[in-house]
Amino acid sequence: MRSRPLLSEGDLSTRARIRHAAVARFGRDGFDASLRTIAHDAGVSAASVVKTFGSKEALRAECDEYVFAIIRDSKRSVIAAQSGAPGAFIGQLARMDEYRPLIAYVLRAIQAGGDMARSFIDHMVEDALGYIADGVAAGLVVPSRDEEARIRFLIGATLGNLLLALATEPDPSAIERAEFWDRALNALTLPALEVYTEGFLTDRAMLDAYLLYVPDPPTDSSGVVA
Amino acid sequence: MRSRPLLSEGDLSTRARIRHAAVARFGRDGFDASLRTIAHDAGVSAASVVKTFGSKEALRAECDEYVFAIIRDSKRSVIAAQSGAPGAFIGQLARMDEYRPLIAYVLRAIQAGGDMARSFIDHMVEDALGYIADGVAAGLVVPSRDEEARIRFLIGATLGNLLLALATEPDPSAIERAEFWDRALNALTLPALEVYTEGFLTDRAMLDAYLLYVPDPPTDSSGVVA
DNA sequence: GCCCATGGTAAACGCCTGTTTACTCTGGTG
DNA sequence: CACCAGAGTAAACAGGCGTTTACCATGGGC
């Protein structure tokens, strides 16, 4: 019910101002960003950050929760656009000025790994399992021998390519600008649509050989085949 | 012409022993690993590392060069297996005990970004441009409207998925064990072969809409479309 | 008018980092 | 033997980090 639900700079409590600065700075520079830098961004002292949140780890946890919640909500808004590849909604959000810092934060969190990365990806997988099943039922999507493994692969392809774009970008401030995301997403869209629509290999030799080698698609959750 | 050309533990000069320890430790823990840890692994003092290499940055540079050179050479050995997706040879190498620390190192370097990551990926792209063109000419590979963009996407899909597996692995020592790579690679192989062989979307609507929206495939090297 | 809770800070603390300094040991040479 | 070059190290150093401590201001309740 807030009039400007995301990152508004002006009339915020100290706590919210620090959190805002932390999300932006973590997204820009990664989680090695120092408390003093964040404090400076927020216009307070480093001691004040610790006094407000208890510790850097607690600040990080609150940022995680904050960003995660907003992204989760926003997914419902753009869920109509979820007809494409799993993970593509990240790209849609990154094109919106107000969501861009949050997407940067999410990518940094995935890059850093840990529980946050795992649970975020798991959440995307669970989401995708639903609407991909719908796509298959509607005849829009080719069925797979292991739906979850395919979804993890496709999400990994999208996120992984974005991660690579992030890691190989020389200018650390580029991640804040729309131009960076336009460039990264445009480079991805055509080849992804090509490969997903027209395939990449013309004959089935490799797939059939692998299917022969591996007796059956796995039934456990990890997609591991013996 | 060395009898054991890669990482042999025993009869090495101090310089080689430190470099060996550094490659292994950087690959396991990333480049934040401390000089003291590496020195301890190599059985020397931290001062000795600096005295031998000049600085941590110089040690890192020598490790980069060393690993890069070996991977580059080894690619020629497994080039017969390069019939599959771009970047897949990384997976082949990771299954070999002697190359596994080097692959871990490369992934950490890509994760860390910077010049090393860029030049390594560029090198893979250049390689793939050649043999994918052959595949297209032989009728084994579907042609693309922008070959380089497709290759970057496919390489990013493979490397990105491995990066995600690395980042979401809770046990930091798992990366040294064959089981981790088997798990990660097995989870990737089936869905990749499926999508590359059978496609993912059944109709051309999205691709055609995008092709209509974007006037022409780009001719510049970056794959950027306006 | 007093007083205490609240919110904030400057300065210091302890720890870890890469690096430097001063020193010791060892082995080969004139 | 004398001696010097090279390899190696322990200990100290400077700087950055997250965090703690002691302190200051401000403002509402008795």
Image: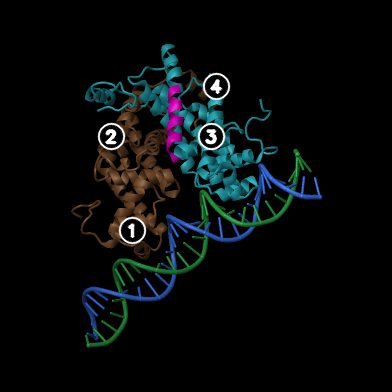
Chain colours: A brown, B cyan, C green, D blue
Asked if the residues shown at circle 4 and circle 2 are in contact, with their CB atoms under 8 angstroms apart, the answer is: no
Q: Does label 4 lie on the same chain as label 1?
A: no
Asked if the residues shown at circle 2 and circle 1 are in contact, with their CB atoms under 8 angstroms apart, the answer is: no
Say which residue label 2 marks. A182
The residue lying toward the viewer, choosing from A113 and A141, is A113
In percent of width and height, residue A55 lies at 41, 61
Rendered view: A43 above or below A181: below
Q: What chain does mark 1 sit on?
A: A
Residue D11 appears left or right of C10: right
Residue A221 visible, this angle: no
Q: Residue at x 40, y 22 (%)?
A: B198
> Depth-wise, is mark 3 or mark 1 nearer the camera?
1
Rendered view: A15 above or below A172: below
Q: Which corner quadrant of the image does residue A133 belong to?
A: top left
Quick one: label 2 or label 1, which is nearer the N terminus? 1
Residue type beneath disc 2: Asp
In percent of width and height, residue A71 lies at 30, 46
Query: What is the number of the mark on residue B103?
Result: 3
Q: Main structural element of the magenta stretch: helix, strand or loop?
A: helix
Q: CA distance from mark 3 to mark 1?
A: 39 Å
Secondary structure state at the residue bearing disc 3: helix
Residue lying at the far left in this picture: please name it.
A3
Chain part drawn in magenta: B112-126
Q: Does label 2 lie on the same chain as label 4?
A: no
In percent of width and height, residue B138 lies at 44, 11
Say which residue label 1 marks. A39
Q: CA distance from mark 4 to mark 2?
A: 36 Å
Q: CA distance from mark 2 to mark 1?
A: 31 Å
Secondary structure state at the residue bearing disc 4: helix
Quick one: label 4 or label 3, which is nearer the N terminus? 4
